[in-house]
Image (cartoon, coloured by chain):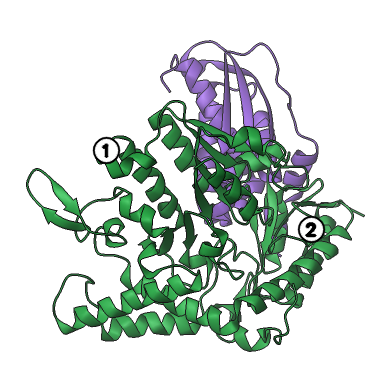
Chain colours: A purple, B green
Amino acid sequence: MQLQQMYQEIILDHYKNPHHRGLRDPFEAEVHHVNPTCGDEVTVRVHLEGEGPDAKVVDVSYDGQGCSISQASTSVLTDLVIGRTVGDAFGTMDSFVELMQGRGRIEPDEDVLEDAVAFAGVAKYPARVKCALLGWMAFKDAVARVVDGGQA
Amino acid sequence: MTTTAAPLDVAALKADFPILARTVREGKRLVYLDSGATSQRPRQVLDFERQYIETANAAVHRGAHQLAEEATDLYEGAREKIADFVGVGFDEVVFTKNATESINLVAYAFGNATFSDDPAAKRFALGPGDEIVVTEMEHHANLLPWQQLAQRTGATLKWFSVTAEGRLDLSDMDELITPRTKVVAFTHQSNVLGTINPVSVLVAKAQSVGALTVLDACQSVPHSTVDFKALGVDFAAFSGHKMLGPSGIGVLYGRSELLQAMPPFITGGSMIEQVFMDHSTFAPPPQRFEAGVPNTSQAIGLGAAVDYLSALGMDRVAAHEHELTGAALSGLQEIPGVRIVGPADNVDRGSAVSFVVDSVHAHDAGQVLDSLGIEVRVGHHCAWPLHRKLDAAATVRATFYVYNDLADVQALLDGVRETQKFFGVGA
């Protein structure tokens, strides 16, 4: 059944028990993103150490309200990027965005995306892709504000 | 709602809507509960529009050839049908692209009047000290044009709030509508809550201070008998695609005397009287407000939709929807963990039924319903301030129309229970 393909157990687990949720100090940038079609929103803070693409993502904290897809994907994001360099994190993000925009035709690489492969089924529902990307786009924006000195 | 006429024969009229025969999501029967967003179209409307294109298509109000004559007659004939349908004069119906454009037309015309030298336009002018009153339950289409007009002119925007039950809070009406008020814009029937607002109370108050009234009738005209003259509003807007008609066609009603005095919004071809290099004069209404070649086949199609609805009888349509709404309201309230957003009693309300399922986001509920073939709207339904006020980030909305029946309501109720089961919540 298509519904189970979309709502993988991994997604429902992250939704019910989100990882790294809550806003924490310290942070260098905080952004607030909304999905204008449904009103879902997320606030993301990033704490980086170092400069440029080699800067380390020390912490990503967030708060928000939204559907299972947007909340779970933000939780998965934190697992994937905390402790990595900005360059690595953006590489993973590119893979995730490619997967989500692939209309279900892209085979995800589990070594890169880990739990995020569970979102492959969501990519078949164009209306929900924005939900899955909400937290990721906020993270990208927040990092860019630090790394590019607000030029994002 | 009492009516002596026989109820709608839904089984028979369903056959007029080819789309209802298709299946969705792996063979599920289509249960279309999103007519509040856009309605489906009967063959009669499609055939009429097609017949016009195949036999009489031409640019209206321009050519002198036979096709142009026939096209113009059909286009103006549609205007007459629509005017009759809402109880107004033929020259009081302006065709637009949709209701959003209709409301913007009024707001921009008021803005143009503000900066006009024409003494006749002065009555529409706005400036610092003037006030525009709206309500918290407005669709964005009846909020943003006024918000923006206030910003452009320096006027102040004020609004009625909404009670927890989803009714308009009229307790501070005397403070809100005062001699400073120039415009009162409000919805006839909320697209989220279903609430039918007391038009006569608001119109009487607005008239007592000399304010103009603008009615968003998008959710009332398709579903019940509406007579703008009887309601006494100065302007009203509705869309064709929500009343079995084509998309790309909307209507603005404006009281004749007001349209005569009002400056145009969009200028260009066919809205003129005389044109010189440095100035121009304008055609009388409604042509003054219909610059450019209009959406002709869509207007003609809307005329056919009005014929279709008139043949059904709007009182019967309203009675039918009232029955479905009652069944949906009582059925949803029997499900633990479901909360109606809007009046829970089936009084002074239309067929928009919005609700939240505890612990399940509206998007997720909508996804499960969609997997069962039940097409509902999820989100804030272009009424974000209202959702914020009612503390619901997003709701699920079912809307009913002529082709829905009690089996559709039952499918919705079963689908909501299925949703709770899927996410492991509820009873």
Name which residue type carries label 2.
Answer: Thr
The answer to whether mark 2 and mark 1 are in CB contact below 8 A is no
Residue at figure coordinates x 56%, y 30% from the top left:
A138
Residue at figure coordinates x 54%, y 60% from the top left:
B218
Left or right placement of residue B413 versus residue A128 in this view = right
Name which residue type carries label 1.
Answer: Ser
| Camera sees residue A143 | yes
A73 up-or-down from B15: above or below: above
Query: Given the image, what chain letter belongs to the residue carrying mark 1?
Result: B
Give SS at disc 2: helix
B402 up-or-down from B175: above or below: below
Say few, some or many: other residues with alpha carbon within 10 Å of mark 1 (under 14 / 14 to 19 / 20 or more).
Answer: some
Q: Which residue is mark 2?
A: B419
**Residue B156 placed where, x, y %?**
50, 29
Tag 1 or tag 2, which sits nearer the N-term? Answer: 1
**Residue B357 placed where, x, y %?**
79, 51
Residue at figure coordinates x 43%, y 80% from the top left:
B46
